[in-house]
Image (cartoon, rainbow, N blue to C red):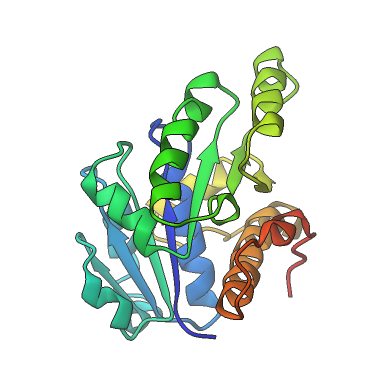
Amino acid sequence: MSKIAVAVFNRKGGVGKTTLAVILAQIALVRHNRVLAVDLDPSKNFTSAFSFLKDSSFSDYFRTKDTLEDSDADAPEEWIVIDCPPSLDESTKYAVEFSDITVIPVRPDYFSVSPLRLLWTIAEKQGKTASQLPLVKVGFDTSSMAKVVNQIIQEGIFPVAGELPMHKGIPYNITSGRIWSVGLPARNRHPYESVYLKITKAVERMQNGEKDVREVWKSGGDAE
């Protein structure tokens, strides 16, 4: 398989966007891929997370930068993971256009799904299909608001790639300079690894000529 470029975006802050970007990039590293981490968010938390790994065994296998350029399509890394700012500015629009897949983490609140219509307007003009913009549900519960947001998602055009639990050990690991999954049992790691594997499968199918990869997001995505 050739290069995979993934953008992680939501115009709403606080939905776990950077955490998911870090996890996807680190799973790629653990699976022996070289990773280019592109940090477009002014907070630079994505860059900070990777700076903690510079003295680790992974240090020769990743690179960070804060701009995305056409030439990155020819970068030597197998995975490009782009952490977008929580705004639909020009850098974000270019990231969506550049990427094979744009992953959209959403929380069980209305404001995390309200930007989706505008995002689709932009993505459609770039020739993207809705199946290239999967949602990832983060920390959904049984509250009334979660039920409302679930209904909005079900009535929308974007597929759902997975549902991720909230686990306090993950941000602790990331900010401590450890791999995200340290100390997590398999049942807690699996939802994240499943999303990673689905992305890999979706891009592989796209490279084989499929335009709509919606069925990939519906699959189990069992870890290999």
- On the question of residue 45 being in view, the answer is no
Which quadrant is the N terminus positioned in?
A: bottom right
Q: Is residue 23 rendered to the left or right of residue 175? A: right
Residue 176 rendering spot, x and y as whole percentages: 40, 54
* Res 115 → quadrant: top left
Q: Is residue 160 rendered to the left or right of residue 142? A: left
Q: Give the residue at x 27% y 63%.
A: 51
* Res 150 → quadrant: top right
Q: Give the residue at x 33% y 86%.
A: 76
Q: Is residue 24 above or below residue 111?
A: below
Q: Is residue 202 above or below residue 17?
A: below
Q: Give the residue at x 48% y 25%.
A: 114
Q: Is residue 66 above or below residue 73?
A: above
Residue 83 rendering spot, x and y as whole percentages: 35, 53
- On the question of residue 99 being in view, the answer is yes
Residue 140 rendering spot, x and y as whole percentages: 67, 31
Residue 214 rendering spot, x and y as whole percentages: 68, 56
- Seen from the viewer's position, the closer of residues 102 and 48 is 102
- Seen from the viewer's position, the closer of residues 56 and 24 is 24
Q: Give the residue at x 65% y 25%.
A: 152
Q: Is residue 164 rendered to the left or right of residue 46? A: right
Which quadrant is the C terminus positioned in?
A: bottom right
